Image: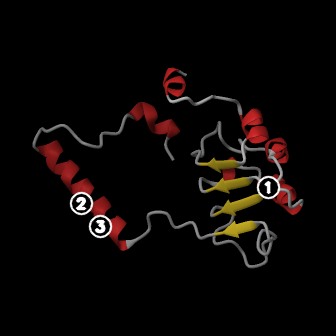
Amino acid sequence: PEVAAKLGVEQVGLDELFARATIVSNHAPVTPETRCLIQERHLAALPAGAVFVNTARSWTVDQKALLRQLLTGRFWAALDVFDIEPLPTDSPFRGLPNVLITPHMAGQTRETYVKQGMVAVEELERYFAGEPLRYRLDPAAYDRMA
């Protein structure tokens, strides 16, 4: 709360967020607490013309509710995650005029694979040299990580 206040950010719950925001972008990891976190009541509360972006995981959103609400045409959506990937050609999400579908491919390039490998090698070199790691993972944070 202190950091948010310093940045001029108002923290609100999901119900209020969906009722007030014109753009909602979901980046939540899948955990037991976030599975179907975004439900029909949230999507139904979006203002007309709002945009909902889901680049997290499909399981954080009730997909049937999302489809029902998108069929109303009240808001737009940009989606790159679905329960079944790749998205079947007969999916009802396809062809909706208010939905932008993109492939879920974040980070999957030759360059990113090379970079990931180099970072891993550099971390191993630091570890065996007794130096502090640059990208140490905190085991206490594992349950929040995607």
Picture quarter containing residue 96?
Answer: bottom right
Q: Are marks 1 and 3 in contact (CB under 8 Å)?
A: no
Q: Which residue is mark 3?
A: 114
Picture quarter containing residue 99?
Answer: bottom right
- Res. 82 visible in picture: no
Tag of residue 23: none
Residue 101 position (above or below residue 146) = below
Q: Secondary structure at mark 2?
A: helix
Q: Which residue is mark 1?
A: 49
- Res. 46 visible in picture: yes
Nearest to the observer: residue 143 or residue 97:
97
Residue 111, image x and y in percent? 33, 69
Picture quarter containing residue 79?
Answer: bottom right
Residue 76 position (above or below residue 110) = above
Q: Amino acid at mark 2?
A: Met
Query: Label 3: how many residues lie within 10 Å, few (<14), some (14-19) or many (20+)?
Result: few
Q: Are marks 3 and 2 in contact (CB under 8 Å)?
A: yes
Cα–Cα span, label 1 and label 3: 41 Å
